[in-house]
Image: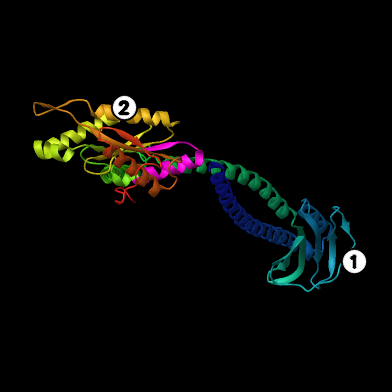
Amino acid sequence: MAKRIFRKNLQAIALAMLAALILGLVLSAYLLQRNLRSEALYKSDILASNMADAMIANDMRQLQSLLLNATNTPDMQTANVYDRHGQPILAWNPQGQLIKTSGVEATTLLRHHTVDFHPGSFNAISPVLSGTTVIGQVQLQISTWPLYQHILLFLLIAAFLSVFITVLAAYWLTNKQLRSMQPIMELSVIAEKVATLGDYSLRAPQDPEHELGSLNMHFNLMLARMEAWENDMQSEARERREADSRLAILNNHDSLTKLPNRHYFHRLLSNCLEDAVTNNEIAALMFIDLDHFKGLSESFGYDAGDLILATMANRLCGVLRSTDTLCRVDGDEFAAIMPNVGSLEVVEQLADRLVKAINQPMTLRGQQILLSASVGVACCPLHAKEQRLFLHHADIALKAAKAAGRNTWRLYNKDLPKTSQAVQLSI
């Protein structure tokens, strides 16, 4: 940015200096031209005045002496003296010699002095007067080289000074502008960091004494408001996520046992079956139904029934593996989804341990009671690959366990009696 500002300042000052240089050159040339015109006219008038007496006396020696003295300057080009009839009587050349007047043309005498400007010279004419009578004329041709020499010298000196002043002024002006723009440049850096990092806690340095110090202050206030707004948005988003999480838990979990509910069970079972078929693994499903739970709940009260369900849920979770999922699918019915069990022996061992865990005594209102459960087991893909059929076979195994006297488990096989009742957990 500093280079760009310096370049623009240099261009602007250079244009201004060029305009000033041209104006100064024109003005100087005009004034010098006026001075040279006046000087040429003055020389011709003085020479004409000095020659009046000698011309009346027809003293050629005196005329020659006066002419040589008057032309003894380096800028003189030619000098001619005419008599009362306009005939040349004396002439002087640039070599400083009097020459013959045979090559000089006659002229018409003028009663007043005049100066004509030509590109290479000034032509000054003054009449020689005797009182009011014109008795001759003096014509001097003076070189304009001093004018051009002055213009050239002026251009050289002015150009050098202009370049020096332009660079110095551009450097000084750039530094001054950069100091004045320092707060804006700092704001630019902070704004870029905020846009890149998204960190609204950044602040621009403040200088109360700087003329633009209030700009940084207001920018910091804006960042503070944006930071507060972002914090509010993040807090609101966090609260919304927490609310969504709580809602998801409520929608997918049982409020009493904190276990996944029937809706979550169906989604998880569908994924488990798909993985088992794809990876050629054995997955198991166990339906667990507490025996005679309705009678216990009526005898001890519904609060006791809730306590029994929560206790049984904890016992069952303590037996299952960390990869297994226990769900509460109905009032006193649970379902365990067991992915990648490895073999039927593992399934049978887990079913036996579940039945024994439920058989452990439980104290309820000072009275020790014994609970039991019936467990039905089906495996995928051994018994079914489709979810509806898988549920149906697990339900058949559960009913077979109940038919066997309860407090036991049964693994589905095709020889089990088929039930005509609808599958309880059909989708």
Q: In the rendered view, does 12 fall on the left or right side of 237? A: right
Q: What residue does disc 1 label?
A: 103
Q: In the rendered view, does 253 fall on the left or right side of 382? A: left
- The percent coordinates of residue 256 (x first, y second) are 20, 39
Residue 312 shown in magenta: no
The residue drawn where x is 27% and y is 46% is 251
Q: Which mark is residue 349?
A: none
Q: What residue does disc 2 label?
A: 353
- At numbered mark 2, what does the secondary structure look like: helix, strand or loop? helix
What is the three-letter code of the residue carrying label 1?
Gly
Q: Quadrant of residue 117?
A: bottom right
What predominant SS class does the magenta segment belong to? Answer: helix
Residue 321 shows in the view: no
Mark 1 crowd level (few <14, some 14–19, many ≥20, 10 Å Cα): few
Q: Nearer the viewer, residue 138 or 350?
A: 350
The residue drawn where x is 16% and y is 41% is 294
Q: In the rendered view, does 330 fall on the left or right side of 307? A: right
Q: Quadrant of residue 221?
A: top left
Magenta-colored span: 266-285
Q: Earlier in the sequence, mark 1 or mark 2?
A: 1
Q: How is the image coloured?
A: rainbow
Q: Quadrant of residue 206?
A: top left
The residue drawn where x is 22% and y is 32% is 372
Residue 282 shown in magenta: yes
In the rendered image of this protein, does residue 283 appear above or below residue 130?
A: above
In the rendered image of this protein, does residue 308 appear above or below residue 122?
A: above
What is the three-letter code of the residue carrying label 2?
Arg
- The percent coordinates of residue 44 (x first, y second) are 72, 61
